[in-house]
Amino acid sequence: MIDQAEKLRLRMNQISETVQNKEEVKNVPNQEGFKSARVIAVTSGKGGVGKSSLSVNLALQLQKAGKKTVIIDTDFGLANIEVMLGIRPRSNMADLLFHDKRIEDIITKGPLDLGFISGGSGVQELSTLSKEEIQEFSSKLSLLDDMADVIIIDTGAGISDAVLEFLLCAPEVLVVVTPEPTSITDAYSLLKTLNRNPGFDMKDKRISIVVNRVTYKNHGLEIFNKISMVATNFLKMRLEYFGEITYDDKVSRAIIAQKPVTLAYPNSRSAKDIEMLAGKLLDESSIKENKGGFARFFTDFLKNNKHK
């Protein structure tokens, strides 16, 4: 068995090699004693479409199904995840940088023992760090691969540089839309901007659409077909349909009560829909080939951001 100190040293060696040779960050090697977590980014073209609610409730359903899940809130400046979980973290990602915290110290436990990490301003300050500081920070974060089966990254909404970088590095992306025309057009704008980025490669990516607040059966599929047709014809992007969530006033009631809807109203229409979506993620056929887990994800993120 490898203790945590030894794992940290090995991870630092891995990160050191990839930081020194940025042209060869293709795979972060999985040495003996390491495993790779599944990394899923949840995003949207605009705010107010239920992105964070989906992130939280999917994470809880995966945790309930026996998958150790950690949700990372990278929507800097907002506290949506904290509000929905009804918790206030004592530490955030910046504490790994400046207060010599361990990864265990910044994980707050939520309902069902779900792990939650508040991004704070930590990632935004990475560009100011030295190479040695980056190596240590990355190695600490990469230990999440040993601690979680699934890592859900709740990004900000829109097409900011920070959001795009998270999407470029994540092997799986869920794009949340609603039937509103502005949500559909903003989702397409997000896809178009992502597609035009020089670092984007569809071969390394699974992009799925989930339609929230539908009002009749197969409403989501209709919305998906519209987005998919335009994305295929003009962007040459292959999208997948993840599913739909029925409009339900229980969701807003749950948010007011600071409880996730799948826990506050487990028999509601929206909770049942989210439970089905979690089942799709648990289906082995839906799992994209894992190439390095969170260690690979964050190393790619640092590679893209350090020398901008």
Image: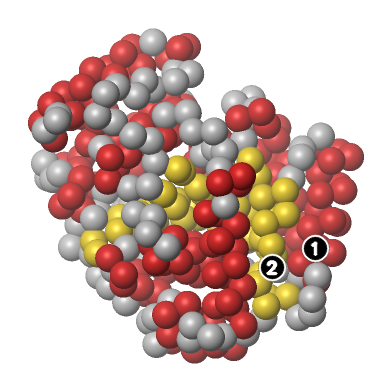
Quarter where residue 21 is shown: top left
Tag 1 and tag 2, C-beta contact below 8 Å: yes
For residue 63, say whether it is visible. Answer: yes
Residue at (24, 29) in percent of width and height: 33
Quarter where residue 269 is shown: bottom right
Q: Nearer the viewer, residue 208 or 154?
A: 208
Which label is found at residue 244?
Answer: 2
**47 versus 143 height, above or below:** below
**88 versus 99 height, above or below:** below
For residue 306, say whether it is visible. Answer: no
Q: Residues within 10 Å of mark 1 (few under 14, many from 20)?
A: some
Residue at (76, 40) in percent of width and height: 238
Residue 283: x, y in percent?
57, 52
Residue 295: x, y in percent?
36, 32
Q: Residues within 10 Å of mark 2 (few under 14, many from 20)?
A: many
The residue where tag 1 is placed is 221
- Where, quadrant-wise, is the N terminus in this rendering? top left
User: In 3D space, how far apart are the residues under numbered discs 1 and 2 (Cα atoms)?
Assistant: 8 Å
Say which amino acid is labelled 1.
Answer: Leu
Residue 216: x, y in percent?
79, 79
**251 versus 42 height, above or below:** below
Question: Label 1's element?
Answer: helix
* Left or right of 61, for residue 227: right
Q: How is the image coloured?
A: secondary structure
Q: Nearer the viewer, residue 65 or 277?
A: 65
**Of the image marks 1 and 2, the number of the one nearer the N terminus:** 1
**39 versus 152 height, above or below:** above
Image mark count: 2
Question: Label 2's element?
Answer: strand
Say which amino acid is labelled 2.
Answer: Glu
